[in-house]
């Protein structure tokens, strides 16, 4: 049998942890974990997906006559667990900032999850428009059920609608974990802060990146490997990145962005604009405008400065 010097490794790992905590000025109190759990949140989101779409994303043996009973029982279980995770995030932040009592943190966690729960019917309604947009926008889609069960873009937008609500309610860490679960499964990276209108469709999806301050209108269609990113990252006097600030694109209603396009900075794509594949874009596009590699090359060679 191979002998491992486990005790020595345990001691060395403890030393590394302690050094990190000292540098970060952290102190752990005895007891359970300090931060929310990725595993618990994955279970919560899986349950919420079943609550939103019981007969398609719920339990395999669910019968329609038991639908309301399942939704009620599953919803209560998921929300109770979510309160626990929200409490962990709010307590962690309060300790870091040296503010808020434990009782107030508990009250805030309950209030925010209660507000989140009240928004679930509206989330389901907007998700219905997303599913329909995917079905209508893809000639290969056989049914809305196929879209909901199979399409990575639909899975990503379900996670995003839930994550964005958590983000809006002041639970950004929970929101980010929920978003990153979808990112890991689909290759679609949507920051939970992004504001996305109804009837949103990501076709194929792999490699799509949508930044935190992006604003997307209704009936927008995006293909794989599209980036809605930031162009510049301002730094403070100490050379650290400045957090926040509107730095991602605004995409108006009815815009189509084809595969591989990269749009950077706080530019605006006007209503009905069409952005061709593999375009690199750093300036506004007027309503109804069409941008392609050919048009960019033409304007650049004529001195129009499109690639500023």
Image (cartoon, rainbow, N blue to C red):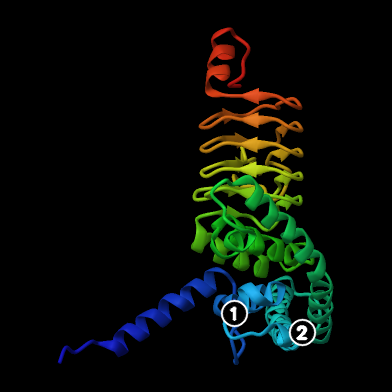
**Left or right for 252, reference 237:** right
**Residue 170 placed where, x, y %?**
77, 66
**Residue 267 placed where, x, y %?**
70, 33
**Left or right for 125, reference 147:** right
Query: Residue tagged by mark 2?
Result: 68
**Residue drawn at the location 84% of the way across and 83% of the way down:** 107
Quarter that holds the N terminus: bottom left
Residue 58: image quadrant is bottom right
From what the image shows, is residue 283 above or below residue 48? above
Say what secondary structure mark 2 lies in.
helix
Q: Nearer the viewer, residue 195 or 108?
A: 195
**Residue drawn at the location 65% of the way across and 37% of the way down:** 256
* Pointer 1 or 2: first along the chain: 1
**Residue 92 placed where, x, y %?**
68, 76
Say what secondary structure mark 1 lies in.
helix
Label drawn at residue 43: 1
Q: Nearer the viewer, residue 18 or 88?
A: 88
The reply to whether residue 265 is visible in this rendering is no
Residue furthest to the top in view is: 302
């Amino acid at each position: 049998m191979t002998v491992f010097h486990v005790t020595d490794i345990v001691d060395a790992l403890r030393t590394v942890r302690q050094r990190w905590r000292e540098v970060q000025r952290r102190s752990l109190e005895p007891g359970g974990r300090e931060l929310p759990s990725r595993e618990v949140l994955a279970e919560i989101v899986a349950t919420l997906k079943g609550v939103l779409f019981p007969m398609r994303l719920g339990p395999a043996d669910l019968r329609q006559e038991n639908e309301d009973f399942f939704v009620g029982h599953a919803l209560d279980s998921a929300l109770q667990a979510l309160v626990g995770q929200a409490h962990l995030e709010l307590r962690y932040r309060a300790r870091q900032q040296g503010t808020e009592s434990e009782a107030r943190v508990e009250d805030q966690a309950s209030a925010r999850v209660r507000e989140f729960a009240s928004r679930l019917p509206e989330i389901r309604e907007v998700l219905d428009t997303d599913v329909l947009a995917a079905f209508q926008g893809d000639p290969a889609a056989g049914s809305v059920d196929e879209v909901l069960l199979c399409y990575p873009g639909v899975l990503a937008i379900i996670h995003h609608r839930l994550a964005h609500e958590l983000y809006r309610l002041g639970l950004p860490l929970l929101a980010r974990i929920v978003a990153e679960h979808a990112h890991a499964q689909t290759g679609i990276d949507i920051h939970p802060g992004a504001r996305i209108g109804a009837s949103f469709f990501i076709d194929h999806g792999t490699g799509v990146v949508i930044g935190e301050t992006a604003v997307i209108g209704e009936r927008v269609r995006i293909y794989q490997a599209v980036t809605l990113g930031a162009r510049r990252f301002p730094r403070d006097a100490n050379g650290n990145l400045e957090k926040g600030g509107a730095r991602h694109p605004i995409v108006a209603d009815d815009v189509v962005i084809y595969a591989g396009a990269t749009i950077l900075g706080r530019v605006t794509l006007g209503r009905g604009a069409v952005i061709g594949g593999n375009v690199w874009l750093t300036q506004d596009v007027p309503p109804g405008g069409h941008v392609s590699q050919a048009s960019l090359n033409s304007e650049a060679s004529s001195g129009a400065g499109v690639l500023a």
